[in-house]
Each structure stands twice: as C-alpha cells, then as structure tokens.
Image (cartoon, helix red, strand yellow):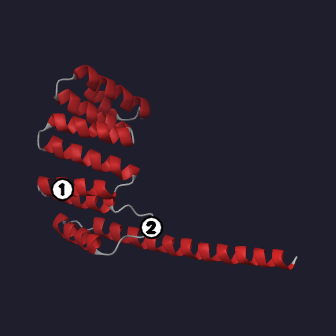
C-alpha cells in the first residue's frame, strides 16, 4: 500500500510539472501572437518589414508557433511595396519552416507572386500544390482564375464548381464562372 501511495504521489507531481509547462508555453504563445498583432496594426509596410525582420532574428518562437507565418507576413509586405523577388524569397523560406496549413499558405503566396509577375503557368502549378496541402474554396477560385487566364476554360469551370461546392456564398466565383 505504501508503494502504491508513493506511485500516485509521483504521478501527481509529474502531472503538475507538465501542467506548469503547458501553461508557461501557452502564455509564451499568447505573447508572441500579441507581438504579431501589434506588427500587423502598423500601417507602414516598410516599418512592418523591419519589425518582422527583428522578430525573425530572435530565438526560436515558442513550441507550437509556425515560424513560416512570419516569413509569409513579411513577404506580403514586400508584395505591397512591389518588391516581388524579395516576397518570393520569403515565401520560399517559409516552406522550410512550414507545418501543413502554412505550407499551403506559402504555396498560395508563391502562386500569387507568379500571377503578379504574369507567369500564369507557374501560378497554376503552385495553386495546385497549395490545394494538395489544404484544399479551400478560395484556392479553387484562384486556380480557376489562373486557368481562365491560360484559356483552360473547362478546367477553370470545374475549379469554380469545386469552390462553390465548398462555399456557395462566394459571389465573385459566380461572376468568374459566368
């Protein structure tokens, strides 16, 4: 009986330590997202780039934070400024750190880069990669738009149908489909 009591006590102590670690990590994650939110509220994209760069230079983010998200956010600032090659570099860097959801986001951002630089076949390739990671109505819509620009009308129409099947409220898809 004494050894059973000691075993229970040890289990409780280990559980308490684990709960403290989870709580500590949760607070760190919350603080990290507060920093990201404050950066995103900065209206000047050049200033946001500096702030995201500073955040990327710090030690690794807390466990559970996908660092690729920061590269994507900084890449979006570069896109705003028309610095497309820098944006593409950040999107590609984000793939090195990406967990599944952000991998899809990184592919979609690279596809957007190719749309902006008028390389529609490459945009199609990357939208397909994004969809293979995490399909969404918006990705199917964007793929449909690129296919439409590439004069692949039947396949574009199929993408629009998939987008509408996932979210029938996307008015722009009805417009593009027509």
Q: Position of residue 25 (x, y in %)?
A: 49, 72
Residue ID at (24%, 36%):
125
- Secondary structure beneath dot 2 equals loop
Left or right relative to 7: residue 97: left
Between 53 and 6, the one lying in front of the other is 6
Q: Is residue 112 visible?
A: yes
Residue ID at (36%, 38%):
132
Q: Residues within 10 Å of mark 1 (few under 14, many from 20)?
A: some
User: What's the mark number on residue 118?
Assistant: none
Residue ID at (38%, 61%):
66
Location of residue 178 with respect to 41 vertically, above or below: above
- Secondary structure beneath dot 1 equals helix
Between 109 and 57, the one lying in front of the other is 57
Q: Residue 172 is drawn in which quadrant? A: top left
Q: Residue 65 is drawn in which quadrant? A: bottom left
Q: Residue 78 is drawn in which quadrant? A: bottom left
- Distance CA(mark 1)–CA(mark 2): 24 Å
Find disc 2 in the rendering and name its residue.
63
Residue ID at (71%, 73%):
11
Q: Is residue 41 visible?
A: no
Q: Position of residue 159 (x, y in %)?
A: 32, 28
Find disc 1 in the rendering and name its residue.
89
Which image quarter holds the N terminus? bottom right
Left or right relative to 10: residue 79: left
Q: Position of residue 6 (x, y in %)?
A: 78, 79
Location of residue 8 with respect to 82 vertically, above or below: below
Residue at the far front in the pictured view: 3
Q: Earlier in the sequence, mark 1 or mark 2?
A: 2
Q: Residues within 10 Å of mark 2 (few under 14, many from 20)?
A: few
Location of residue 6 with respect to 114 vertically, above or below: below
């Amino acid at each position: 009986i004494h050894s059973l009591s000691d075993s229970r006590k040890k289990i409780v102590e280990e559980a308490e330590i684990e709960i403290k670690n989870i709580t500590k990590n949760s607070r760190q994650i919350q603080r990290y997202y507060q920093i990201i939110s404050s950066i995103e509220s900065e209206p000047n994209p050049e200033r946001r780039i500096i702030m995201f760069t500073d955040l990327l230079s710090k030690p690794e983010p807390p466990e559970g934070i996908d660092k690729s998200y920061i590269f994507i956010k900084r890449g979006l600032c570069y896109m705003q400024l028309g610095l497309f090659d820098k944006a593409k570099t950040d999107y590609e860097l984000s793939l090195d750190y990406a967990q599944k959801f952000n991998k899809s986001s990184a592919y979609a951002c690279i596809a957007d880069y190719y749309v902006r630089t008028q390389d529609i076949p490459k945009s199609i390739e990357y939208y397909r990669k994004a969809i293979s990671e995490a399909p969404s109505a918006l990705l199917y819509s964007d793929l449909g738009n690129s296919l439409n620009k590439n004069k692949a009308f039947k396949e574009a129409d199929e993408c629009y149908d998939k987008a509408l099947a996932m979210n029938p409220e996307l008015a722009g898809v009805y417009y593009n489909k027509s």
